[in-house]
Image (tube, rainbow, N blue to C red):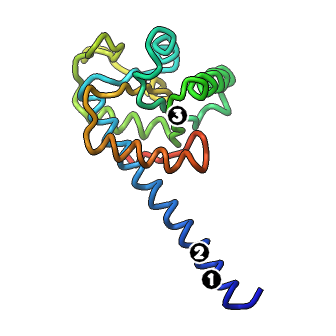
Amino acid sequence: MKFDEESDWNIKATTRHCINNMIKMDAGMALERVLISAKLEGRITYGVYQSVRKLGIIDPQRVMVCLHADDNADEDVALHIHFTLMEAFCRENSIRLIKVDCHESLARLLRDTPPTQAVDNNPTPPAHTRVNTEDFVCLLVDFPKELDDDDYCFLELYHTLAQEMPFPRISVAA
């Protein structure tokens, strides 16, 4: 390989890496917007057991995305088993699944948003029920009645990331 070819290859690889990083940053911001609007509309189910129970009774096509914050999954065998089974269920039912780096970031993001009442019998905790930080290791987000620009942006970015990895990992900056 000549110097010019080597230089050209490095520039293409660097450009692809930068574009992938920008998509991940945009996906993180889009995810944050989707989560905030979902909380305001009462479309989030918090916790592993509540999410598993809900997946067993609803049409999987109602689920916009399932989030796993797997920062503790290596230390907690039961949590790791639940996540593995949920990943298989999500894959089998074409449910979007995203791995988030830290459940505490999700907790900070969603606790800063004022609580609302549940909608459509969604097991979202009422305002007087306190959600534990551990409940943020797994979230289910239902589709809204009508998709807005943030939802479309998030879904498009998800599909771009999912081409590289079936369950993309996104950082939440909150």
Residue that badge 3 annotates: 97
Instruction: Report helix, strand or loop for mark 1.
Output: helix
Circle 3 packing at 10 Å, graded few (<14), some (14-19), many (20+), is many
Nearest to N terminus: mark 1 or mark 3: 1
Q: Residue furthest right?
A: 1
* Residue type at numbered disc 3: Leu
**Image label count:** 3
Instruction: Report helix, strand or loop for mark 3.
Output: strand
Instruction: Report helix, strand or loop for mark 2.
Output: helix
- Cα distance between the residues tagged 3 and 2: 29 Å
Circle 1 packing at 10 Å, graded few (<14), some (14-19), many (20+), is few
Q: Image point 48% across, 29% down: which residue?
A: 66
Residue that badge 2 annotates: 12
> Which quadrant holds the N terminus?
bottom right
Mark linked to residue 8: 1
Counting from the top left corner in percent of width and height, residue 7 is at: 65, 85
Counting from the top left corner in percent of width and height, residue 45 is at: 40, 21
- Cα distance between the residues tagged 2 and 1: 6 Å
* Residue type at numbered disc 1: Asp
Q: Image point 52% across, 20% down: which residue?
A: 48
Q: Looking at the rendering, which quadrant does residue 71 occupy?
A: top right
- Give the answer, above or below, for where 16 lies relative to 106: below
Counting from the top left corner in percent of width and height, residue 99 is at: 54, 38
* Residue type at numbered disc 2: Lys
Image depth: mark 3 or mark 2 in front: 2
Answer with left or right where residue 33 lies relative to residue 5: left
